[in-house]
Image: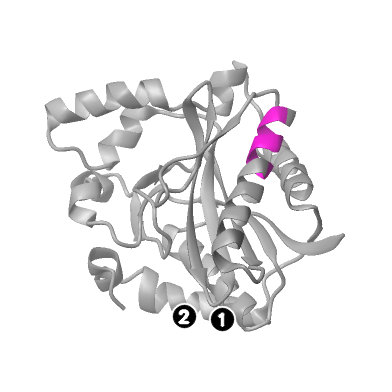
């Protein structure tokens, strides 16, 4: 049985969260950190966009500024995501690939996503794996409605996959910060989203604490990945790299607006 490091939930700004994920990725590449499972939250609430997205199309920057919502560009692909301080848990997995690169990327997606499915079922929610197009990250769905989405970055034989696990969802709030073509277009997008998104609370009809959900997520990942996780902490090296990345990359206008460092 392999042992992984577990980083217990902490709240950070969007810039710090993305910097920590990349710092762990870099440390794993360099052999200075083990495979790692991390949970975190966003304070303040934030919008993250995919590596190659156009921030002006994907984000309502005016509303984000007015309400103090962070906006950050990820190093992973995928689409724009609203991260509410109270209503979601975000996970990240950093793991070394095996020899067959293409096959192992798919295998990693499958295993990580099945960890989320296993956790959902332990909570009493009948979640399923929803495979999408070859260039799109799979989702976890309940009755065809998305409850978790993920994105991935791959560097030098190491995978970073991070994603959301929705506890509650406020679609109107979400799309007040995401970009829509017009007010009429926003109403249409919101109506579609109501049919396509769900959450743990929506499915159970009751509240579940973040602590309890994280405990069950750990068990789900352990089973799906066939590992034991051991609670640990970031190394001083990772903390130093994360601080540098936050200041010089993720908190900069150049990175967030143009995707350049």
* Percent position of residue 171, x then y: 36, 28
Name the residue that disc number 2 marks: 244
SS label for mark 2: helix
SS label for mark 1: helix
Quadrant of the image containing the C terminus: bottom left
Name the residue that disc number 1 marks: 240
In which quadrant of the rendered view does residue 93 lie?
bottom right
Q: Nearer the viewer, residue 104 or 206?
A: 104
Q: Are marks 2 and 1 in contact (CB under 8 Å)?
A: yes
Q: Which residues are magenta?
A: 115-121
Q: On screen, 221 above or below 237?
A: above
Q: On screen, 180 above or below 9?
A: above
Quadrant of the image containing the N terminus: bottom right
Chief secondary structure of the magenta span?
Answer: helix
Q: Is residue 134 left or right of residue 227?
A: left
Q: Does the magenta segment cover residue 88?
A: no
């Amino acid at each position: 049985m392999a042992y992984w490091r577990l980083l217990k939930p902490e709240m950070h700004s969007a810039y710090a969260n993305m910097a920590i994920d990349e710092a762990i990725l870099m440390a794993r590449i360099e052999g200075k950190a083990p495979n790692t499972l991390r949970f975190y939250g966003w304070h303040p609430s934030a919008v993250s966009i995919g590596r190659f997205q156009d921030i002006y199309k994907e984000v309502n920057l005016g509303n984000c500024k007015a309400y103090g919502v962070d906006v950050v560009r990820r190093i992973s692909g995928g689409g724009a995501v609203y991260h509410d301080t109270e209503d979601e848990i975000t996970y990240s997995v950093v793991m070394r690939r095996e020899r067959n690169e293409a096959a192992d990327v798919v295998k990693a997606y499958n295993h990580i996503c099945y960890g989320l499915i296993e956790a959902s079922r332990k909570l009493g929610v009948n979640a399923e794996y929803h495979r999408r197009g070859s260039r799109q990250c799979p989702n976890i769905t309940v009755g065809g409605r998305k409850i978790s989405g993920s994105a991935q970055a791959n560097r030098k034989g190491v995978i970073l996959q991070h994603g959301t696990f929705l506890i509650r969802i406020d679609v109107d709030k979400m799309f007040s910060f995401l970009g829509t073509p017009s007010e009429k277009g926003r109403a249409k997008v919101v109506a579609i989203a109501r049919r396509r998104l769900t959450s743990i609370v929506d499915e159970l009809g009751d509240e579940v604490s973040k602590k309890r959900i994280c405990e069950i997520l750990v068990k789900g990942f352990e089973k799906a990945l066939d590992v034991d996780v051991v609670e640990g902490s970031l190394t001083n090296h990772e903390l130093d790299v994360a601080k540098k990345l936050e200041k010089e990359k993720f908190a900069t206008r150049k990175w967030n607006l143009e995707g350049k460092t």
